[in-house]
Image (cartoon, helix red, strand yellow):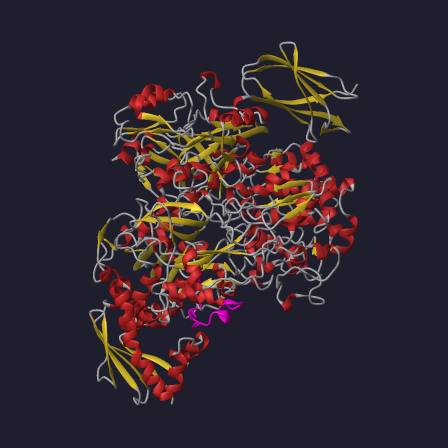
Amino acid sequence: MKSIALRIVLFILAPMLNRTSKKYPAFRDEARLHDCVLQIKTKNNQIGRHYFFKDGRVRSVAGVHPSPDAAIVFKNVDIAMQTLRPDAEMAFKVHAVKNFLMTIEGSDSIANWILKLLQRMNYEGFKFGEKMPDGCMRYTTVTNGGPLHVHVRDGKIIRMTPIEFAEDDAASWTIKARGREFKPKRQTTVAPHGCSMKSTVYSDGRLLHPMKRVDFDPDGERNPQNRGISGYERISWDEALDIVANEIKRQKKKYGPGALLLQHCSHHQWGNVGYYLSAMMRFGNLIGYTRMAMNPDSWEGWYWGAQHHVGFTQRVGTPPSYGTLEDCLQEAEQIVFWSSDPESTNASYAAFESTPRRLWAKELGFDFVHIDPHYNPTAQLLGGKWIPIKPTTDPALAIAIMYVWATEGLYDKDYVAERTTGFDEWRDYLLGTDDGVPKTPEWQESETGVAARDVRALARSWAKKKTYLSCGMSGTGFGGACRGATGTQWARCMILMMAMQGWGKPGINMGGLIGGSPVDLQFYFPGYADGGISGDLNFTGSAISNYQRMPHILTVNPCMQQVPKQKIPEAIIDGEAEGYLWDGMSQEGQFVPFQYPLPGFSPIHMIYRYGSSAFSTTTNSGRFAKSYRHDSIEFVVNQTIFMEGEAQFADVILPACSNLERWDIGEWNSAGGYGLHNTEVLNHRVIALQHKCIEPLGESRSDYRIFTEILERLGMGAVFTEGCGELDWAKRIFDSSDLPKHISWKEFVRKGYFVVPAEYEESLRPPVSMRWFAEGRKKDVPEPHPLPSQWAEDFGYGVHTPSGKIEFVPEILKRNEETHPERPALNRYIPSWEGPRTKELVDRFPLQMIATHSRYSFHTYSDGSSFTNQIKDHRTQIDGQYYWIMRLSPEDAEARGIEQNDLVKVFNDRGAVICAADISHLVKTGVAKSYESSASYEVLQINGEEVEVGGSLNILTPERPQVPGTHSMSPNSTLVQVEKYRHAGELMKTRAA
Amino acid sequence: MKKWNLIIDVEKGVDFINAVLSAKDEYVGNEHPGYSAPVALESSDIVTIERKVRGETPVVDAVNVLRMCNHCDDAPCMKAGGNAVKKRDDGIVIIDPEKARGRKDIVDACPYDAIVWNEELQLPQSWTFDAHLLDQGWDKPRCIAACASGGIEAVKITDDEMRKRAEDEQLEVMKPELDTKPRIYYRNLYRYNTVLVGGTVTCENDTVDDCVEGATATLIAQGFEESVVETDEFGEFRFDRVAPNTGSCEILISCDGYATQSISVDVQDSKYIGVVRLERL
């Protein structure tokens, strides 16, 4: 019986393909790609049928063909029927493949093509997007700056707009506070880099053809010394892919595992299929590579410092925000923003979602304080007290505030007694009992530049009012002061201040109305760090839910060698480097050193660089140019969208298309992994099909296709794709989520987006973060943290420290003090090793430079877009060329004879960058304020001096870790001198030429 | 007859850059036949923002003022342009993308510098209030959704209704003295066109310097009491909405238990007068 059924299934396959071809020209075009013979059969050859593909038509004949181009072979009739039935379970199919119940024989690329063609029959003829009155098709996409509608006409993007919700989209939440009701606007918001996305897609910097460096010959002279110098010539895709595939094979044979370094940035274009933690990781695991061990670059001080006092290890040391939006609006009276500028940092990907909430607070009469060397855009919007501070001295200010609290009795004594340990020791330090130096407001004045009277006024105000403390990008951490030499000290102080004020009591918490929104956090859709299609269970969050909910073939990188991201140049040039683990499982993981090279593994001889440029996101980045040119690096391939700073160092460039030119699926602002529930920063959760809005520009191809075609050359194409195209994977991700309970796939791909219903019932909303702790109850917020083994006492009681209490002098640092003396358990103020107290340096480089997260690009993404370049607060156009902006105080500018829009040289011993000066009272005297993340790296010789003119300020920042024994970065502790550039005329002439 | 107007709150300009970028997105390289020819990238500032910083560290503030075609009812560009510039019944001013070719004088006619010159097309161009979209059924121009923080409002009401709103809500227009009757209104424009004078009041308290909260600061200009404010918990006072170039003023600082102090200042632009230290009586 089953045999007959299988014969029928095999018989109807050809007519089905032909019917689809006849009806849909696009399908026919795809079916025309190969003329070939496909065999489908049982392993014992008893049942089989072969298919002749010719010019897009299929003819089938029963029986076994003697020499098919490709064959799909099932162990028996049962397996074949279970796999081929229309409602076959993906878990079974994956099981069949993993256990060789179903195998592929013959040409990998033809098998891969046929499998994808079969998948495509499932949705051919579906409507994608909606027709608009002006003839445009309206599609959807998701960017790092928010989801967008994309209007397309004649294959060209006409406009991109925020998504305004339809009436039948889920209702918005309401918050009741102080007799008023607050509701968000019925739309998505968009960050500036999302607004300029069209010009990013059509940027002049787009790479449109595969290219090879002119003096690179894979079979002869490779000339590594000319990387970044010699130009490029166009080559065909076949040639480019052959070079890359052959080089992977050659390196494997010659050096073995470890020779290939797969290097990428911390972010990527949005989408769960195309994200680097998804397709790239799957590709990498299939070829094996030396892993670039990332440092917790945005979390530094929280990870290496703050977590030891209170935990939150699985959030990399930053506390959660559950319930704080309502609590803050209902209870608090004041918000202190400390190195926190949500209007510029947009909660990372959340655009201006939280801006209206801060305006609600302003309407409710909140007081605001801004501690920052820059009167930043958040301060500009809200007003309040500005406390300009010298960069890196923030812990001294915090300690002096705590001194006032301790001496004037302005702290929560019951909370300190019941919920904390070690306060007496800490108080002795504040009062100077232990070292003879009372940490008075006067003590800190010369250190921080903050008047002692302001410290007293702030300390008293803070203690008198119910105050929220907003730190960094999320309000509970990330960026800013945690990324300087004193970053660990500062983040530790923030936790201690919260402990002294009764953290978790009504109106007393962390945050700046950035997170804690009452969206439904339990509606499942995977975030980008949940691994996507990677199948990687070791270095993504896939194992938590994604791997079970979306059955797919797991992949593993068997190469144990890692190289610390911040020390890649040393690893290559000196041949060795040491790092420390970034581990979210335990507080102890970070004390574990690792070495490069690892015994038994090859040093790096090939760099597979994936996407964007790190010259302006990694410290002292001129080092990377040197390492790219090192003899030991025999091959560099760069797969990227734009000709950015690092692309010019490649031997072969593979042009990828943007995510507007390929299929994907994603949820706005959803990270998953260490960013559990981070959609709580949104007003509405929005999940979108990321339509392939236009065809890839030029010859560019999707990352997924590039990986597939390299792996086909290694015989692993079908293992990589599992027979799926990008849209098929999007469907599998859709199926794995809670979406099918609410919307059909067919409707989803037409409409493009889904608004997740909010948590309307107040009693079901997450409780306020830390309220359970303040009240001595069992933990009740919906985070499965820390791991069960990490609770010292009863499961669910207390925070993640040995005592279960907030520890003023952490036990874990005490235990490790002998090996890590630079991180003393008692959080003493240690001035920056590059800062106001390093006199010899200050004499030569008297200004403190901070280059914070860019307001107008997403790190390097969208920088280089023509619209972004024209933003007058982003770059300044002088004589037809754009220059990065350095913000100076009028006093510093005048002392140097610098006027508005003058070209200035910003320099120290590490290099020189030419910027345009922007002079205003918004910057503290003594500070040079800019943004990181220029995508451009352009080094010129002007008048015998090497200067960088693209704005890569990170060539000036120190490569030193914040404290020894950590793998951390400290870009915000940089001393520079700024002078009016004397060779401006010559520079302009050179750049114009 | 209901007509379009825009109300811009300069205090909420944190996301106004999105209006600038959205205008580039809508007009650069896009032709809207009958409304506008493609705007050239290099002259695409048909919507711009101007930063205004007032005061000095640490008493300082800053706003972004959004500027674009004012769609004036008595538009100088129409006077100069003749039939090359037309006024629609809904108040929107359109520079005709055909008839205005070669008319650089139309650029020069605008007292707000809101018209750009497209060198390649030899065409004056401005922001059309997204009229092509409104005519297709959009209910507002793109800048509204792009700047979702609520700083821009588009209203289609009669001129009488708009006049009343402007009066009730103290809305202002740019360069009212020109009497061009702009349709772009501003809220909180004092942050742009008036002066801020600040200072800090301190006293000695148990041998240390402390901020004085609740001291009274009075600004006297040309003998008239201009403004009275109280210091906050950081001892700071701010006189706002002071007329630029007010000239010589006197600031009196008084507080119970302390000797009143008088400071002479010359107020031309915004300034921070520094720390005033009170002496106990």
Let me know if residue A892 appears in the view. Answer: no
Residue B152, horizontal then vertical, whole percent = 50, 35
Q: Residue A249's quadrant in the figure?
A: bottom left
Answer whether residue A963 is magenta in the image.
Answer: no
Residue A742, horizontal then vertical, whole percent = 51, 62
Type of secondary structure dominating the magenta stretch: loop
Q: Residue at x 37, y 86 (%)?
A: A77
Q: Residue at x 46, y 40 (%)?
A: B139
- Left or right, A333 with reference to A146: right
Q: Residue B138's quadrant in the figure?
A: top left
Question: Observer-nearest residue: A225 or A253?
Answer: A253
Q: Residue at x 67, y 47 (%)?
A: A176
Q: Is residue A862 above or below residue A246?
A: above
Span highlighted in magenta in the image:
A542-563
The C terminus of chain B appears in which quarter of the rendering? top right
- Left or right, A83 with reference to B234: left
Question: Observer-nearest residue: A612 or A252?
Answer: A612
